[in-house]
Image (spheres, grey):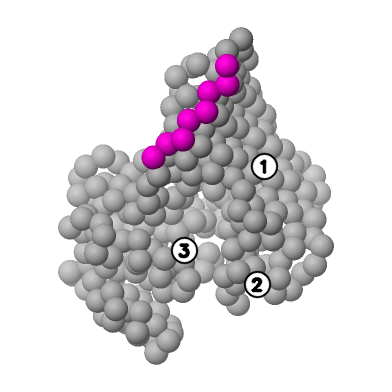
Amino acid sequence: MVNAAIIGLGWWGKNIVKAVQGKSAQLKFVRGVTKEIAETREFANEHGIPLSAELDEVLADPRIEAVVLATPHSLHADQIVAAARAGKHVFCEKPLSLKRADAERAVQACLDAKRVIGVGQNKRFWPAMTALRGVVASGDLGEVMHIEGHYSNENSSNFFAGWRDKPEETPGAGMTGTGIHILDAFVSMAGPVAEVSARFASMRGGHDPRDTISVLFRFKNGMSGTLGAVRPSPFYWRVHAFGDKGSAEALGETELVVRRSGAPIERKVCPAIDSLRAEFDAFAQAVAGGAPYPITPAEMTATIAAFEGIIDSIASSKPVAIS
C-alpha cells in the first residue's frame, strides 16, 4: 500500500479522494494539503485525512511516499520538481504543465531522482479507448492515415472555480479541461505532433464560458488529424481512427464501433470500470516496482508540446510547427 498525500482539495481533488480512499487496495491518502482548511475539514475527517496548509510539511514527512497534485496548472512544474527532489513519487493532474520547457524540466527531475511520474489522463484508461488502441495497433485498419477527436463537457460551467477564469491558468478555451485528453489520445496512437493550426471562437466571456476550439494536426509520422471542443455543450466524447482498410471509433467510456471494407459494422460495449481508480492503481503499481505507468514521460512531454503549439497558433492565427 502506497502512502500518499493529496495536494489540493477543490472539486477535482475531492473526486480523486472519493475514487481512491478506502476503495483502492494499492494507494491511500494519509495527509492532505489545502489553503481552505476550515472549509475542507469536514470532508477530510470523513475520509480520515489529516490536513496541512503547506506542501513543505508533506515533503518533509518520511511516511509519505508519493504526492498527488490537484492544484492550479501553473503550479504543477515547480511542485513536481520540489517533490522529486524530496524523494517523493509524483502523480500530477492534467495538464502536466502549460509550457513544453516546464514539462521537460518536471519529467527530468523525476528521472534524475529515480521517482515515478504519473499524469492524470483518466480517459486513457476508459475501456473504449483501450479497445480502440488495440484495434489500431493490430493492423486491422491497414495504414492509419487520419484521426479525429471531439470532447465537449459542460463541467467548465457547472464546476467553476475562480482560478479557472484566469487566462494564464486556462489558455485555449477548453484545451486544459477537455482538449488535453484528446491530445493524449492522439499522441498514444499517432505519436508526436509536427504542426498545428488552431481557431478559437467565443460567444460570451465571463463566469459562464461559451466558446469553441478547432484544431488541424499534422503528425510526424505523416498522419493528419482534427480536434474539436465546445465548453458549454453536454458531455460528448469521440475518437475515430481512419485507415485504408477500415475505421474504428470510441464513443464515450465503453462503446467501440469498427467498420471494415466489405464487412458488417461491428459494435461492442465494453464492461465499465472506475477509470480514476484504475489510473491511481496503475501509478501505485509503478511506485511498487511493477509495470511502468502506461503514459510514458516522452508521451507526457509530446502532449504538452502540442498543447503549447495550439495556444501559440490561437494567438497568432497561423500554423505553428513543433520542433
Residue that badge 2 annotates: 165
Counting residues from the start of the chain, the first of labels 1 and 2 encountered is: 2
Residue type at the position of mark 1: Leu
Residue that badge 1 annotates: 227
Q: Distance between the Cα atoms at labels 3 and 1?
A: 25 Å
- The segment highlighted magenta reads 264-271
Q: Which of marks 2 and 3 is in front?
A: 2
Residue type at the position of mark 2: Asp
Looking at the picture, how far across and down is residue 13, in whole percent?
Answer: 42, 68
Residue that badge 3 annotates: 76
> Is residue 97 visible to the viewer in this orientation of the structure?
yes
Element class at badge 2:
helix
Q: Is the N terminus in the top left, top right, bottom left or bottom right quadrant?
A: bottom left
Q: Is the C terminus in the top left, top right, bottom left or bottom right quadrant?
A: top right
Local crowd size for mark 1, using a 10 Å CA cut-off: few (<14), some (14–19), many (≥20): many
Per the rendering, the mark at residue 79 is none
Element class at badge 3:
helix
> Is residue 175 visible to the viewer in this orientation of the structure?
no
Q: Which of marks 3 and 1 is in front?
A: 1
Front-lying residue, 136 or 298? 136
